[in-house]
Amino acid sequence: MKKYVLTCLIFMLFVWSSSGYAYPERFDVIIDVGHGGIDGGTVSPNNMLEKDLNLEIGKKLYQKLMDQGYNVGITRLRDYALSDDSRLGIRSRHLRDLTQRKLIADALKPKLFISIHMNAAAKESRRGPLVIYQASEKSYAVAQLLQQHLNEVYKMKKWPLKGKSYFLMKHLEMPSVIVEVGYMSNPRDLAMLTDEAMQTQLVDAMAHSIGEYFLVYPVD
């Protein structure tokens, strides 16, 4: 197991060195960019892949938080399948991917873990952000803040959801949330998610939420 944790640390060191930053003593936030590589995630009606939107917004949030002085890690900065790193002998590629994300979180022990995803539904009318949280006080607190500020961007009123069955929600020890930023199956949401100015608004809303969270639960 130590070998695999070391692999994760080496990967994160590469991410930091390639970004021009020194490796920190501690991490405040890990941004987990959903899907990647062979795993495209959901697909929009015009054949846009979720993995690409996750990466665009994840990188913007990463840079925004770095600019604000946080020590931030990110699980991928390019189109890459984390399952390719696994040597655990797990047959399911999906489970290998999730396990690699958990190992990164376990090794780096951030104060907060945020996984970026996009939503989709059979009904085109469904839209808006959805924040999924684990069963903990801190996770619920940051989920409420994220949902509130993303709702303001969308001009909607929605509520966060407890994620009982999600692998990362069940297995991560630190406060963790999944942010479904919007519905790729909805034309209005998709237009927002692919517009650079709107991406910036969404990232600003998430960064503001994280700042409010750390006011209540300060970093050491």
Image (tube, helix red, strand yellow):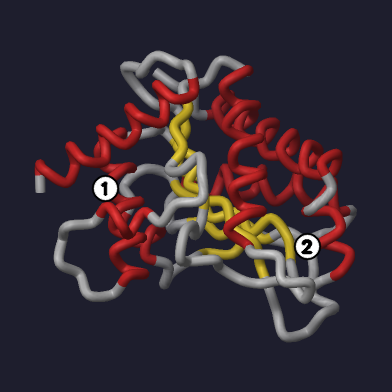
Which callout, 1 or 2, points to the residue nearer the camera?
A: 1
| Residue that carries the numbered disc 1 in the rendered image | 103
Q: Position of residue 47 (x, y in %)?
A: 72, 71
| Residue that carries the numbered disc 2 in the rendered image | 128
Identify the residue shown where x is 31% and y is 43%: 104
Q: CA distance from mark 1 to mark 2?
A: 31 Å
Q: Residue furthest bottom?
A: 122
Q: Is residue 90 visible?
A: yes
Query: Label 1 neighbourhood size at 10 Å, few (<14), some (14-19), many (20+)?
Result: some
Per the image, label 1 sits on a secondary structure element best described as helix
Identify the residue shown where x is 69% and y is 55%: 181
Does the residue at mark 1 contact the one at mark 2 (Cβ under 8 Å)?
A: no
Q: Position of residue 97 (x, y in %)?
A: 35, 60
Q: Is residue 138 visible?
A: no
Q: In front: 184, or 65?
A: 184
Identify the residue shown where x is 40% and y is 21%: 17
Per the image, label 2 sits on a secondary structure element best described as loop
Q: In front: 99, or 215?
A: 99
Q: In front: 23, or 46?
A: 46
Q: Dividing the image into 4 quarters, which one contains the C terminus? A: top left
Q: Residue flagged by tag 1: what amino acid is it?
A: Leu
Q: Is residue 125 above or below residue 107?
A: below
Identify the residue shown where x is 22% and y is 75%: 91
Q: Residue flagged by tag 2: what amino acid is it?
A: Gly
Q: Earlier in the sequence, mark 1 or mark 2?
A: 1
